[in-house]
Amino acid sequence: MYTQAMDTAPKEERKPIRSAEEAQLEARFETRIDEGDFVEAKDWMPEHYRKTLVRQISQHAHSEIVGMLPEGNWVTRAPTLKRKAILLAKIQDEGGHGLYLYAAAETLGTSRDQLLDALHTGKAKYSSIFNYPTLSWADIGVIGWLVDGAAIMNQVPLTRCSYAPYARAMVRICREESFHQRQGFDALMVMMKEGTETQREMVQDAVNRWWWPSLMMFGPPDGESVHGAQSARWGIKRISNDELRQKFVDATVEQAKVLGVSMPDPLLKWNEARGHHDFGPIDWDEFWRVVGGHGPCNRERLAARVKAWDDGAWVRDAALAHASKQARKQATQEQAA
Ligand SMILES: [Fe+2]
Ligand SMILES: [Fe+2]
C-alpha cells in the first residue's frame, strides 16, 4: 500500500558531482523530468534518484506482504463463505502487489534476496499501520475501508511517478485497491444496517482504534518530511503528505455519515472558509514509537514473516533443483543434436 515509510529513513548525504560528464547527464535528466518524461530502467539516472526509488519501492513491497498478516488471522473466522472468499482474494491480491513491486525494485539493480534480507533482519521499514492488532471481524471491514482507502489516496498519484516500471505496477495495484476499499465498506454496511446492536458497537470500536493510525499512513507533516521536497522535484511524489491526508479526511467523513459511525475526534468539523474539514492533532509520538519498532505487534509481524520465509525454503530449493535439472537436460540434448 503504503509509501509513508520513505519519509522516515535517515537523511542521506547527496554525493558531490564528480565529473563534468556526470553533471551534464544530471542536467539532461532533470530537464527530462521537468518536461514530464518517464524514466526507464535502462536510462541513465542519478545515484540518489536510484537509491530513493529502491528505498520507496521496497518499503512499499514489504508493506504489501506484511499487510497480509493481520487479515490472514481472520480467514478461518470469516462469518460466511462469501466473506471468506472475498477476504482470501484480497489477501492474495496483496501478495501479488508485493511481487509486482519487488520486481520493479529489482529493475534498479538490487536483488530480491537483498531486499528480503533487509526486511527479515529488521533493517527495512514497512508501513506502521500493520503493527496494530485485528481484534474483531469489524477490524477487517475497517481495514478495507480506511487502510486500503488511505492507500488509494497515496497511490493514485504514483501511477504518474517519473520511474515508469513503478508507475506501471501502480496502475494495476490501484484497480485492485479500489476493490479492497469497497469490500471493506460493504462488510461494514451490512453490519451497520442489518446487524445487531452489538455488531454496530463492534464497528464503532474498530473505527475508534483505526482512525488515527490511518491518518498517520500519510507520513509526517510536510515540514518534517525528510525526503519530500527532493521526491517532489524528481516527480516521484506528486502530492504532499498533508494534502493527501486532508483529501482522505474530507472523503472519509462523508462515507462515515452513510455508514452511521463517528470518528473519534471532537475537533473534526467542516471549515467553510477553507473548504475542508479541520481535524485534531495527530499523536506523532505514537507514530515514531511504532515506526521505531515498539508498536503493539512489531515483533509478532516480523517473526511471522521470518517463519514464512524459513518454511518456504524447501519450495525455493525444489524450484532451483528443477530448473538446473531442466538446464542440464537441455544442454545434453543440444550436445546430442
Ligand atoms: Fe495492496
Ligand atoms: Fe489492499
Image (cartoon, rainbow, N blue to C red):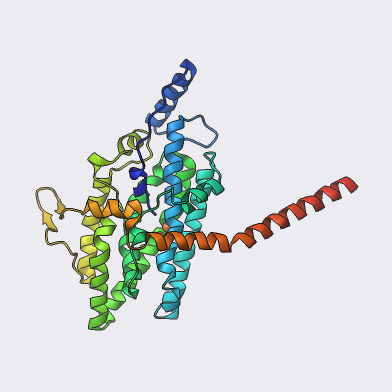
Image-quadrant location for residue 140: bottom left
Horizontally, is 142 left or right of 106 in the view? left
* Viewer-proximal residue among 68 and 333: 68
Whether residue 222 appears in this view of the structure is yes
Residue 79 x, y percent position in the rendering: 39, 80
Q: Say if 305 sits above or below 109 in the image.
A: below
Residue 24 x, y percent position in the rendering: 45, 19
Quadrant of the frame with the N terminus: bottom left
Give the residue displayed 46% in from the left and 44% down from the top. 166
Q: Say if 199 sits above or below 107 in the image.
A: below
* Viewer-proximal residue among 159 and 74: 74
Give the residue displayed 23% in from the left and 52% down from the top. 285
Q: Say if 175 sits above or below 56 in the image.
A: below
* Viewer-proximal residue among 172 and 201: 201
Whether residue 148 appears in this view of the structure is no
Q: Quadrant of ligand 2?
A: bottom left
Horizontally, is 235 left or right of 286 in the view? right
Residue 333 x, y percent position in the rendering: 85, 50
Question: Most extreme residue toward the top, as rendered?
Answer: 20
* Viewer-proximal residue among 191 and 52: 52
Horizontally, is 1 left or right of 331 in the view? left
Question: Most extreme residue toward the left, as rendered?
Answer: 273
Residue 283 x, y percent position in the rendering: 21, 54
Question: Most extreme residue toward the bottom, as rendered?
Answer: 196
Give the residue displayed 32% in from the left and 59% down from the top. 295
Horizontally, is 156 left or right of 115 in the view? left
